[in-house]
Amino acid sequence: MPSLPEFLSQLLNGLVVGLLYALVALGFMLILGVMEVINFSHGVLFAWGAYFAFTLRPLIGFWPALLISPLIVGIMGLILELAVRRSYGKDPLFGLLLTYGAAMALEEIIRMIWGSVGRSIAAPAFVAGPIHFGFMPYSKYRLFLAGLAILLIILVWLFLEKTPYGAIIKAGAFDSEMVMALGIDLRKLRTFVFGLGTALAGIPGVIAAPLWSLKPTMGVEAIMPAFVVVLIGGVGSFWGAILGGLLVGVATGISVMFMPRTSQIVMYILMAIIILIRPRGIMGEKSILE
Amino acid sequence: MGPRVEIIETRSLTKRFGGLVAVDQVDLTIQESRLTSIIGPNGAGKTTLFNLLSGLMKPDEGKIFFRKIDITGHPSHQMVKQGIGRSFQLLNLFGELTLFENIRLAVQAERGHGLKMLSFIDSLGDVNDRSFEVIKAIGLEGKEDIPAKNLSYGDRRILDIGIALASHPRLLLLDEPTSGLASRETGKMTEFIQKLTQDMTLVVIEHDMSIVLSISDHIAVLHQGRVIAEGTPEEIQQNEEVQEAYLGGL
Amino acid sequence: MKRAILKIIRHPMPWVFLFFLILPYLLPLVGGYTYLGVEVLIWSIFALGFNILLGYTGLPSFGHGAFFGIGAFVLGIVQLRLIQGMWIPILAGTLAGAFFGAIVGLFLAKKRGIYFALLTIAFSQMFWFIAWGWDRMTGGEDGLAGINRLPLGIPGLFRLEMENLLHFYYFVYFLFILCTLLIWVIVHSPFGRTLQAIRYNEVRAGSIGYDIALYKWLSFTLSCAFSGLAGSLYALLRNAAFSDVMHWTQSGNVIMMVLLGGGLTNFFGPILGSGAFIVLRDLLSTHTEHWLPIYGLLFMFVIVFIPEGILSLFKKEGPSRESLVSGR
């Protein structure tokens, strides 16, 4: 039985990871909502974010790497979008297949450049080490991570709530008078959203890199929780993604404590249960997926 | 002219979509062997009502009785087995398949052969024969091998109804059967519908008032999800509320 | 009589069977080897069965690799720990595929499109982790080695030494013929036509009296049974069941085979696609260790430019009533 500090500590870990999952899921869902494309390469782009950080940080420092890596990932996303845009309007299956192929290619390229061996990167010096909450030490870095993640989530929320682009995305109205009235070029919107969405995968990759060892397969390990989060939280629901992410993070974290062997499949069991009770996810409504 | 049986009875039938109440506490009775028309302005809830009656949607409140049996919330495939057939306002065919295959699918379902995995479909003699019968009955013989999407619009409308007919319905719901038809074809369709009344009960959603008045035994008027009037064609023509609901009167 | 013979000759199936009959003798002529031939047969079984779900019912499963893997692992587990033999482990692998397919199918039967696809991915990952983590059963990262191909035969008549790859080839060939015929009958049966109706217009299919969820579930389960069978045979071929049989790329591979070969419009597409895939993979990997990116890019290329595959280039306009000749 874990002690109280251990338990709380793991719980917090779960929440922190959950926030990261929520971020990745948000980026994924933006692309899904606007383009109706399941971006299978979303996870691999997360991995690319991490690997860029690994390479760039020793060269240019933490903060520059944090800024530049997602930008590069975003640019990769834009290039990918050039191929993916051929699938718009077709059976959404095609977009999924395209990004599937891209994911395979991108993962292998990581292997080619950085090798298959796991790498690790340490937390930056200014947030290394523990912080003490009375009886309980906790990793400063994880708190920093959580803070960044929350900041980003707030930024995404502001984008959705306060900008014209966001209004259109929320309304799901991509071919209406609303678009024309606001003078928005739909193609630019799509391109922008794809870039934004993939950058939203890259950033968690960068900041999470010190937590997990870097390996080429970390992409799949990031995309799966994103799928599960979207299925649990409900497609198209901002708060569903947050809630789903936290749930998955906490469930995984707790199971690591008590039943470590099942920790990786706990999220799928959770998903299965929720789908049985609420087929559209906790906060989902009838969506483009149906 | 014995007592009429109520083939459909709805009680407080309600369906909401978010904040919008599409069907609002509808109490409706359809008499067997008559042709009842449902009319009303666009958005009055007519197609939603059909969706509820045919099992495509589940009501939020209320009940539906089919010949006194509670069928509320049953899925569409069960409704068909009960004897409710339905055609669609926006054509709903198996476009890639031929006319024959479209009908055959419905006949196959009705005969209960759907789960046969180990026989060839072409070998089901009774299904094939019955399919030809239906095609003849709807007047489209000779066009069996044409893919449905290549048929003329008028023929496709008839096919849409034909598919529903192949299931031997006792009650047939026709959703705007003359929609988009040229005037010559409209006459053909109207005749076709009138012939159907000899064998089954019909409920028709229709916008063309001259057709409604000529074929209906009974008319129900829907407005904003509620039944605002019911009666014979004469009664409805004189009803003021109905005239108000339809700007410009009848 | 003459008409019957003509009909048979004009049909692709006897030619396909003939081709695979003599394939082991053709392969060395082009620098190939029997092992590749067996692989093509196994993947063809996998892809044909999978196409019941994808091509005929229109349901996009991205997780069928899991059932292929389940077939492989169950064969290994049964053969190594329970009953030495061939038929029973193969049967076990097939039934395991069907069983788990049936369970997963319950979650999927009322879904379609992207929702369906996402769920299949999630479930297949779940099975992956179970196989990876349950190392007492599955050998975990190392997998199960030491799977044997035991001799089969009818005492007094003949005996096939399965360790001899050529004999094993013809054993798989025999199963391939059975599966192809079985799947042909299934997709041309009333059931098969109903599946197509669901692909073309699910709503209308329900409106004429078909219980859509039931048919989708059956289609899924059947396709998983064939995946399990293929997986079992694959484990026999490699004399081992490694965790890579369940990797997510296997699911993509079988989709690629169906699409590449034109399985969306032609019954034999999956077979052509399997052959093309194996050839491609072999060619690419002899030239470079890092053939995956090329494969990935090729995958994308196929999707973008020839989504309906090679055979669609030869597609006839619309289905014909003479289903035995048209091949669909």
Image: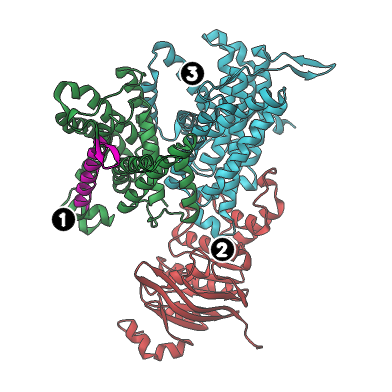
Chain colours: A green, B red, C cyan
What amino acid is found at the position of numbered circle 3 in the picture? Val
* Label 2: few (<14), some (14–19) or many (≥20) C-alpha neighbours in 10 Å: many
Query: Which residue is under mark 1?
Result: A182
What amino acid is found at the position of numbered circle 2 in the picture? Ala
User: Whole-Å distance between the Cαs marked 3 and 2?
Assistant: 49 Å
- Helix, strand or loop: magenta stretch: helix
Query: Which SS class for mark 1?
Result: loop
Q: Is residue C125 something one can see in this rendering?
A: yes
Q: Chain of mark 2?
A: B
Q: Is residue B211 something one can see in this rendering?
A: no
| Relative side of B45 to C70, left or right | left
Question: Is residue B111 part of the magenta span, yes or no?
Answer: no
Query: Are the residues flagged by discs 3 and 1 from a single subunit?
Result: no
Residue C127 spot, x, y in % from top left:
52, 35
The residue at the far front in this view is: A135
Q: What range of the chain is rendered magenta?
A: A131-160
Question: Is residue A152 part of the magenta span, yes or no?
Answer: yes
Residue B49 spot, x, y in % from top left:
46, 72
Query: Which residue is under mark 3?
Result: C279
Residue B100 spot, x, y in % from top left:
58, 53
* Label 1: few (<14), some (14–19) or many (≥20) C-alpha neighbours in 10 Å: few
Point 18% across, 21% down: residue: A58
Relative height, residue B58 to residue B11 (above, below): above
Q: Quadrant of the C terminus of chain B?
A: bottom left
Q: Are marks 2 and 1 in contact (CB under 8 Å)?
A: no
Query: Which residue is under mark 2?
Result: B164
| Relative side of A196 to B12, left or right | left
Number of marks = 3
Q: Quadrant of the N terminus of chain B?
A: bottom right
Q: Nearer the viewer, residue A222 or C180?
A: A222
